[in-house]
Image (spheres, rainbow, N blue to C red):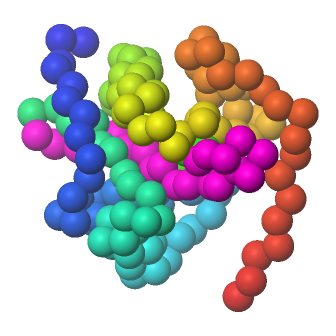
Amino acid sequence: MGDHFTIRRAKIEDAPVIADFNRAMAWETEQKQLEPGTILAGVQQLITNPQYGFYIVSEVKEQPVACLLITYEWSDWRNGLFWWIQSVYVKPEFRQRGIYKQMYTYIKNLAHTDRRVCGLRLYVADTNQQAQMAYRRLGMDATHYRIFEEIFG
């Protein structure tokens, strides 16, 4: 419990571990097997193209133990950007230590420094009650929207 966590923006050198975290999260939450080369390329693309968003990582002794992704959505209704929190992953042995809370606070503080940002959003599985409780404790509210999608390819 006495570990000291540091949070920072991800660098290209973090791409392999973030890709591994994303693969672990996809398996844990959806039993989806992501193709390693595709997910690594996707993480690298995002890190090298900040117009798409950015990752942050939480470290213990300079070793990443958690990450999350921020992507952007323009809101014409608010004339501002929503930051979408995605791809949240905390290594199992580091869960229940407040790491996500620290990452959320980091992102929220960062968002407040950018006048273009009008809010934070995320989506969560209906069945993931533990995550929903964590988000509510941090001051987020459930919305009345449902997400629909059509996947290509």
Between residue 59 and residue 11, name the one nearer to us.
11
Q: Is residue 17 left or right of residue 105?
A: left
Image position, residue 34 (x, y; %): 53, 70
Picture mark count: 0
Q: Is residue 109 left or right of residue 124?
A: left
Residue 98, image quadrant: top left
Image height of 43 relative to 104, above or below: below
The quadrant where residue 139 appears: top right
Residue 83 placement (x, y as % from top left)? 55, 45
| Residue most extreme to the bottom | 153
Left or right of 45: which side holds 136? right
- The residue shown at (22%, 66%) is 12
Highlighted range, magenta:
62-81
Classify the position of the C terminus by image quarter: bottom right
The reply to whether the magenta stretch includes residue 1 is no
Q: Quadrant of residue 129?
A: top right
* Percent position of residue 115, x then y: 47, 37
Q: Quadrant of the N terminus?
A: top left
Which residue occupies 16% across, 42% down? Answer: 63
For the question of whether residue 95 can be seen, the reply is no
Please name the residue shown 17% across and 19% down the image: 3
Is 37 or 10 nearer to us in this picture?
Answer: 10
Q: Let me know if residue 55 appears in the view.
A: yes
Query: Relative to the observer, which residue lies in front, 149 or 63?
Result: 149
Compared to residue 132, the image places residue 82 above or below, namely below
In the depicted structure, whether residue 134 falls above or below residue 150: above
Predominant secondary structure in magenta?
Answer: strand
